[in-house]
Amino acid sequence: MRGVGMPVVVLAVVGGTSGLGFLAGLGNAAILAGLTALFCLLASFGGPLGADLRLLAAFAPALLVGVGLPKLLAGPAPAVAITLLTVVVFGAALLPVLGPRFVPVGLGLGMASLFGYGFQLTGAATAGQLLGAPALAIGVVLLLRVLAGARDPSGPTRQALADALAEDDPGTTERAARVWLSERPVRWTARVLGGILRLRTLIVILEGRRGSVDPDAAREIGETIAAARREAAVLARSVRVRGFPSGPEPVHRSQRGRLPGDTGTLVAQLWSTLDDISAAARDRDRSRVAFPSRLRREVRLSFLRGTVNWGSPQLRHAVRCALGVLLALLIAGTRPGDPLTVSFLLTTFGIMQPEWRDSLDKAWQRVAGSLAGAVVLALALWLLPASALLPVAVAAMLIGLSLMRRLPMVFNGCIVLMAVGMNATSRQLDAGELLLEYLLLMLLAVVVGLLFGFAAIPGVPKPDLGQRLEHALRTGSELLEQAAVRLRGQEIARDRPARRLRAAALAVQQLATGEPGATPPTMAQREAAEQVLAGLHGLYAAAAALLARREADPEMAAVLECAAEALGTAAEPDLGPLERLRAGERDEERLLLLDALSTGLYRVRQGALGLR
């Protein structure tokens, strides 16, 4: 749904859902159903079909409550409606702690709920119609998602793995692991993912060796790494195809001379890893991997429990967001029937971000876009007849939605034309006065959004990035040590590993998000911190998977002890125990966990060196 295809999708979803709503007897709420479906789409695409359908099923009840009940209660019990909506927004702002996939879910839930409350119906609607509108929206989006993914349910998984293989970006590898785990994993994709993790680790190790060998060897290592990356990009095409690839070419090895010490062994392992990925993509073994079925839920719950603490930046953001929206709702309550209430509420919600710098960026985009849109609308009012206002508004909506992600300022400018043009035409209002009112409301929304986006919670410390890094590494080391104790079969309190995982999850949140007033990191420091975060997430997921097996494993315990020591001392990881265990291992699940541990350790070390 990008580019020129977005307007077509928007028209089909909004028009089709609204039409079905009229046929189903929703009356005035039919338009609400169509526009709610648009927000529901935000949470419905992004992963394999099965994972998206499970997420949509979990998301549906909250959407029904958030969109239907506040609108229903707005007349007889406005205070209850505002309270319920504030709680929904609080929950929506808290959802991203569960992972990047939940960011659009929280955004869609918050926007749909505020839109449903602020949307002005052209007449009365019954309780059944108000509750039926979001229900119909969910049903339409569910059908669209099934139709879009039925032909190739696992396509997003292969795409994510291919992207991680072709691109030298830690973010793509983390996303591939997340998408792979969200589906019911099969053996060939597990082998590809394990190969990608191992490939990244070997490349990082070899790049580190270039500074400790003679210039000729360093040049040889650099050329080998470049050749391996080219071969990985070729293999990505085989991974991406739906069926069995038509005879993928064998890996072309590029190594002209022998390298000193064990560097030559590492290079041999590099090419062997590419061979393993090629074989997995060719054979396509679709048998299931015996991964703990409850792993996804346990990891997410651990990160969510880590949020139930006043030290959690995500919790404090959710509190600030709820308070900001509460103030905006109270202000909107003084202007009943105002058609611009929706724009005011959505702008306030959209500006408030977990990072105060992001809040400032959103505010700037809204201000600049609104002013530019106002200038264009003023010219349109001057040069064009009044009858052209509605076509201009519709064209602006389609253009804006197609550029929403790539050019947010243009999107915000188009929203001005859409909101003012449609309301002025449908309600027979003066477009000039409506434009002035819109700009004043946007200014007020920016003030409210920034007030709570920048607000520092009293009594909360403001450690700098270095302090947050040390805390994250220390809690991570303690978690791995506790997991190693459990894997050795020693008796410990049942809830102790869970407490360690919650503390580690909280430290990760604090590393990712600084408090307003803390020393802002540079761009290089932010990129290094993202490396550390990606590594820690991989380590914690592997540790959680090992604990979920609920059986003693002394060999894995030794690996975790080495990993804990490496985290605690920030030294180069000792992968000796890991490599010895890996050499004789045939279980795909354990191999994947070993690769995840080694990759996570080297990512953490690489990122930590950039922060010190």
Image: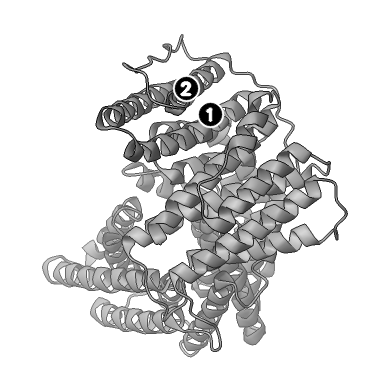
Q: Position of residue 324 (x, y in %)?
A: 50, 81
Which residue bears the numbered disc 2?
A: 274
Furthest-top residue in view?
247
Horizontal placement of 498 versus 221: left or right?
Answer: right
Query: Does residue 64 appear in this view?
Result: no
Q: Residue at x 35, y 29 (%)?
A: 225
Camera-nearest residue between 579 and 201: 579
Secondary structure of residue under mark 1: helix
| Residue type (three-letter) at the residue carrying disc 1 | Gly
Q: Is residue 458 above or below residue 421?
A: below
Horizontal placement of 84 versus 212: left or right?
Answer: right
| Residue 596 occupies quadrant | top right
Which residue bears the numbered disc 1?
A: 195
**Callout 1: 10 Å neighbours few (<14), some, many (20+)?**
many
Q: Quadrant of the C terminus?
A: bottom left
Furthest-left residue in view?
383
